[in-house]
Image: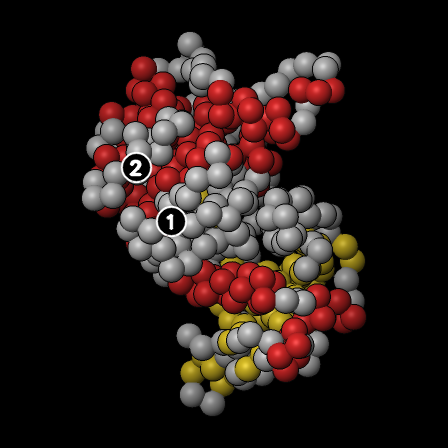
């Protein structure tokens, strides 16, 4: 799959450095451009991009189209972000639990990524309605997430932004991870990076300590997410009227210092897997041994009932949520120079051709 490519800009002029075709060649003699899509509505807005719901005219298939204004991509860091996200979307296309790329193209002023549209709502949406999930449901979603994360890790990619908002459910109830704006590419087993980034409640202790880190941060975030699914709250909830304790700085102190308290309502197996993923020492954390990390996860007693091959081949029927609702919700990464994540407006605006 070949799309546009980005290289370092002379004088930070993005328009001079976007190379490639006006459309992606899907087959000999065939290219796609804006004229091939019908705009339905705007479904997400961020500081660098908007996401449109579109329909491919030739086959009536619906997609999400991420639109990035070139004038907003100012420096090398921004270019790296766009290039990385495009690369990860391309690679994700071969995994059933990652939102993948359909096509990409450009105009003089904008870059376009046409990606899978997932309309089952995100886990945050479902958790707000169900409060917490049965362990069996959490186990199923966690298994699919594990397969997706391991796929990225085998490709040398640290995801770095796992959270309820970024885990979508498709129309059948299988998970699809999305939003690759914080991914780090080129990481081999044993390699590390050092950028401070992530969503505050999910940031691993080693990042907060200013240490170099690797794939371990994704397994920590999975532990936080699994805790939220099964306990109905964050492991780092702070309930106080003291304004000094409602700050990011205090949250980070809690993540670093407060022991994880597992609800007594959870099974011994669930408590064990949460303690494994939420070990503050990445060397001791479940999934973080260089050679056997993923194998350790699959063989953990919590996942003993999982047939990993069947899950990987999408042959296991997903659990039925208590509330069935089609939720037209998708995300656009709101990239900032401080590398912290801010929410994107996801109201569905009535759109016209000017949105392109």
Residue 274 image-quadrant placement: top left
In this view, the residue in front, 126 or 150, is 150
Seen at 48% across and 34% down, the residue is 209
In this view, the residue in front, 52 or 9, is 9
Which quarter shows the C terminus? bottom right
Query: In the rendered image, is residue 90 in sight?
Result: yes
Image position, residue 290 (x, y; %): 25, 43
Query: In the rendered image, is residue 176 in sight?
Result: no
Image position, residue 254 (x, y; %): 54, 22
What's the colour scheme?
A: secondary structure
SS state under label 1? loop
Q: Depth-wise, is mark 2 or mark 1 nearer the camera?
A: 1
Residue furthest front as drawn = 210
Using residue 91 as the reference point, say whether residue 164 is left or right of it: right
- Within 10 Å of disc 1 (Cα), the crowding (few <14, some 14-19, many 20+) is some
Give the residue pinned by disc 1: 192
Seen at 53% across and 44% down, the residue is 196
- Within 10 Å of disc 2 (Cα), the crowding (few <14, some 14-19, many 20+) is many
Residue 218 vs 85, above or below: the answer is above
Q: Counting residues from the N terminus, which is met first, the one under dot 2 or under dot 1?
A: 1
The alpha-carbon separation of the residues under discs 2 and 1 comes to 16 Å
Give the residue pinned by disc 2: 287
Image position, residue 206 (x, y; %): 44, 35
Using residue 55 as the reference point, say whether residue 290 is left or right of it: left
Which quarter shows the N terminus? bottom left
């Amino acid at each position: 799959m070949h799309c546009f490519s980005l290289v370092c800009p002379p004088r930070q002029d993005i328009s001079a450095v976007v190379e490639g075709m006006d459309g992606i060649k899907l087959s000999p003699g065939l290219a796609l451009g804006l004229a091939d899509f019908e705009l339905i509505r705007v479904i997400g807005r961020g500081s660098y991009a908007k996401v449109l719901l579109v329909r491919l005219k030739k086959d009536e298939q619906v997609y999400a189209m991420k639109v990035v204004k070139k004038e907003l991509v100012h420096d090398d860091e921004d270019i790296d972000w766009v290039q990385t996200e495009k690369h990860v979307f391309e690679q994700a296309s071969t995994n059933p639990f990652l939102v993948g790329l359909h096509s990409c193209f450009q105009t003089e002023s904008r870059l376009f990524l046409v990606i899978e549209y997932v309309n089952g709502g995100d886990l945050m949406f479902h958790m707000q309605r169900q409060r917490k999930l049965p362990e069996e449901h959490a186990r199923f979603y966690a298994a699919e997430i594990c397969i997706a994360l391991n796929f990225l890790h085998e490709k040398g990619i640290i995801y770095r932004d796992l959270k309820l908002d970024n885990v979508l459910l498709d129309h059948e109830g299988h998970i699809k991870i999305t939003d690759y704006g914080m991914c780090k590419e080129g990481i081999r087993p044993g390699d590390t990076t050092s950028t401070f980034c992530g969503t505050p409640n999910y940031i691993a202790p080693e990042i907060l300590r200013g240490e170099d880190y690797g794939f371990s941060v994704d397994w920590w975030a999975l532990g936080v997410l699994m805790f939220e699914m099964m306990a109905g709250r964050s492991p780092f909830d702070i309930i106080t009227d003291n304004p000094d304790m409602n700050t990011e700085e205090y949250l980070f102190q809690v993540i670093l210092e407060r022991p994880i308290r597992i609800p007594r309502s959870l099974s011994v197996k669930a408590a064990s897997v949460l303690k494994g993923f939420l070990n503050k020492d990445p060397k001791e954390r479940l999934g973080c041994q260089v050679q056997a990390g993923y194998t350790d996860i699959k063989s953990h007693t919590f996942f003993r009932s999982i047939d990993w091959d069947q899950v990987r081949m999408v042959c296991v029927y997903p659990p039925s949520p208590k509330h069935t609702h089609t939720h037209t919700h998708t995300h656009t990464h709101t990239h900032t120079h401080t590398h912290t994540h801010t929410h994107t407006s996801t109201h569905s605006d009535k759109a016209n051709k000017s949105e392109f």
